[in-house]
Image (spheres, rainbow, N blue to C red):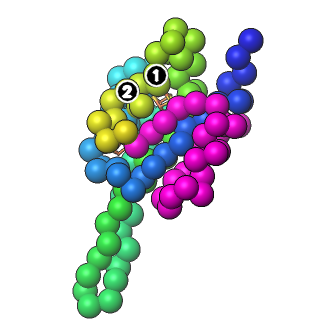
Amino acid sequence: MRKISEYGLLIDYEYCTGCFACQVACCQEYGWEAGMSGMKVNEIVQQLPNDQAYLTYLPFPTELCILCKPRTKKGLQPACVKHCMANVIKWGKLKELSGELGKKSRLVLWAPK
Ligand code: SF4
Ligand code: SF4
């Protein structure tokens, strides 16, 4: 039997456009109330010298994320993965996903508790 604890999400936020499709897809899939979702897209603004600012987006799973177990059991990709047009989010075995770490910067590996 497949153990959910062996799976996770690899998030390559370098290419995140901040479109919020992953967050919305999770809400639609599970009918979360307003303000709740298994995925939260965080907007991070870093002030730089000379009145400049650096803006980046970090999509991050919340405590509500169940790794789309009902979908993956049927052989489907998680809703957030399916709806991310920028291919930022990858679902898979932690063992395999962790092999990607270190190959580039701005990667986050997330595992459920
Ligand atoms: S992870 Fe993908 S779907 Fe989510 S905000 Fe970023 S680009 Fe959009
Ligand atoms: S894996 Fe499923 S439950 Fe988790 S954030 Fe993505 S859509 Fe939501």
Q: Residue at x 69, y 37 (%)?
A: 95
- The reply to whether discs 1 and 2 touch (Cβ–Cβ < 8 Å) is yes
> Which label belongs to residue 55?
none
The reply to whether residue 89 is visible in this rendering is: yes
Q: Is residue 27 above or below residue 16?
A: above
Query: Does the magenta portion include 99?
Result: yes
**Count of number-bearing discs:** 2
Mark 2 residue type: Lys
Q: What distance separates the C-alpha of mark 1 from that of mark 2? A: 6 Å
- Measuring 52% from the left and 8% from the top, which residue is drawn there? 74
Tell me: residue 93, above or below residue 72: below
Q: Is mark 2 within 8 Å of ligand 2?
A: no
Indicate which disc residue 82 carries.
2
* Quadrant field for ligand 1: top left
Most extreme residue toward the top, as rendered?
A: 74
Query: Nearer the N terminus, badge 1 or badge 2?
Result: 1
**Residue 109 belongs to the span the image colors magenta:** yes
Image quadrant assignment for residue 26: top left
Point out residue 107 in the picture as x, y percentages from the top left corner. Answer: 52, 53
- Mark 1: amino acid: Gln
In the depicted structure, whether residue 8 falls above or below residue 55: above
Q: Residues within 10 Å of mark 2 (few under 14, many from 20)?
A: some
Nearer to the camera, 11 or 62: 11
Question: Circle 1 sits in a helix, a strand or a loop, which is it?
Answer: loop
The residue lying at 29 percent from left, 36 percent from top is: 85
Tell me where residue 71 appears, x and y as whole percent. 50, 15
Residue 43 x %, y %? 36, 58
Image quadrant where one finds the C terminus: top right
Q: Give the residues drawn in magenta, as a range.
A: 88-113
Task: Give the residue number, with chain letter if any, for mark 1.
Answer: 77
Q: Which quadrant of the figure contains the N terminus?
A: top right
- Indicate left or right for 88 with 90 as reference: left
